[in-house]
Image (spheres, rainbow, N blue to C red):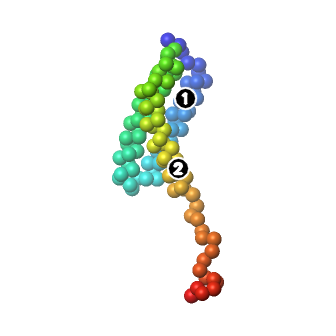
Amino acid sequence: MLTPEKQDRDNFGDAVSHIWQQVANVKKLTEKDAGRNARIAQLETWITEELRQLNGNLQTKETLKIYHSEAADFRRDRVRRPLKSLRTKKKAFCAPAMRPRWSMRGRSGAA
């Protein structure tokens, strides 16, 4: 078994912390939505499974064989799709409200 370089382990640890921080932020933004809370709970389970697999991959010399298996690809995509959707929704949720470019006031025929 190979021992990963310290920098790789540190980078992985930083990435894991960042992931859970993002999940916590999304949970806080959607805390009043029971439906989303259930989906986030499922996503947390998938993230935990994927991070466990990635951590194991970091510890083994068979990393490339494991990382590119059909099962690993399925699990990775199963996590990535909802995260991408959450990021998109979070950006839209946090974006400033759009102001109309024009109003009816001052247009001919408007009351």
Of 81 and 27, the residue lying toward us: 81
Which of the labelled discs sits on residue 21, or is there none? none
Residue 107 location in percent, x, y?
Answer: 63, 83
What residue is rendered at 60% in x and 77% in y?
Answer: 103
Residue behind mark 1 = 12
Q: Is residue 72 left or right of residue 4?
A: left
Q: Quadrant of residue 9?
A: top right
Q: Earlier in the sequence, mark 2 or mark 1?
A: 1
Q: Is residue 108 left or right of residue 88?
A: right
Q: Secondary structure at mark 1?
A: helix
What residue is rendered at 59% in x and 19% in y?
Answer: 5
What is the residue that sits farthest to the top in this orientation? 1
Residue 63 location in percent, x, y?
Answer: 51, 19
Q: Amino acid at mark 2?
A: Thr
Q: Is residue 1 visible?
A: yes
| 55, above or below 62, in the image | below
What residue is rendered at 51% in x and 14% in y?
Answer: 61
Residue behind mark 2 = 88
